[in-house]
Amino acid sequence: MRLRMKKITPSALKNLIAESRLLEADGIGPKVVEAPNGKIIHKLFRRKRWLSSALFYPYAVRFANNARRLDSLGFNTVEVLEIAHCRSCGYHLLSYEKVSGCSMRDLVKESPTKEQFIELGQFIAQLHQRGVYFRSLHLGNVLRNENNQLVLIDIADMQFFRRPLSASQRLRNFRPLLNRPDDRQLISTENWHALVSAYGNLAALETSSITAIKALGDERLTRG
């Protein structure tokens, strides 16, 4: 079901932020806050450039549409409750139910196992086979929920294709997993090979393509 865009006044937006717990911010202001009840996450989007695609297709709307598409494909993600726009402030506000669980990043930090990376490789293969290109794919945006299921968050930057991703798209989509230095420290070469092998067992790819993905990780992990 598509959500109707609501209006929010500057004072109402200011009060909402003041009453909530700050989770993420940048040099301009808050980006993610948690409601006082701890059950709702409010994500704030603003257009960084006057002329951009966000003028016609706001990131909050993309996020909500992506959540609906992922759900239709059988992937677990957040449940969007509301979208609002504060025109005078230039903000869009998106609210969704907080996912109870732990990110793969935190799980690996606490107790890294090869099985975690095998499962992640299988999960990524399922995304790619169903035509999902998740540009923000990294260990912090994949959660394990209370039901032991993997859940995608921070899903505004995503594309959907009617066919499985091409070999070049798949290779590019693995890069975000290796972009963060702290994540590279968590992913050993052995675990990367386990992830890629599990991925290759589900993905219908030529051996050369799997080798390229494995080499990508080897090069980035060796460099540190």
Image (cartoon, rainbow, N blue to C red):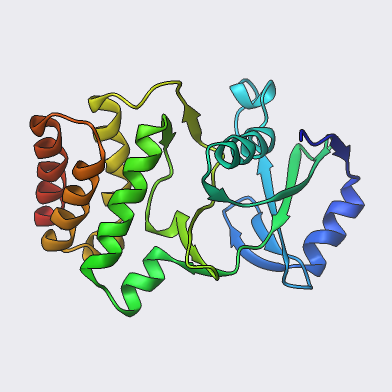
Q: Position of residue 7 (x, y in %)?
A: 89, 39
Does residue 79 lie above or below 34 as drawn?
above
Q: Quadrant of residue 33?
A: bottom right
Q: Position of residue 62 (x, y in %)?
A: 63, 33
Does residue 170 lie above or below 121 as drawn?
above
Residue for point 26% across, 60% down: 117
Q: Position of residue 112 (x, y in %)?
A: 26, 73
Residue for point 83% across, 60% down: 16
Residue for point 21% across, 67% down: 114
Decide if residue 91 is in sight here.
Answer: yes
Single out the residue that lies furthest toward the bottom. Answer: 110
Left or right, 190 with reference to 141:
left
Left or right, 95 with reference to 131:
right
Does residue 223 lie above or below 37 as drawn?
above
Left or right, 127 with reference to 185:
right
> In this orientation, which residue lies closer to the viewer: 22 or 137?
137
Left or right, 179 with reference to 77:
left
Quadrant of image for the C terminus: bottom left
Decide if residue 181 is in sight here.
Answer: no
Q: What is the total number of numbered labels drawn onto the structure image?
A: 0
Q: Quadrant of residue 129?
A: top left
Quadrant of image for the N terminus: top right
Q: Position of residue 210 (x, y in %)?
A: 14, 37
Q: Quadrant of residue 56?
A: top right
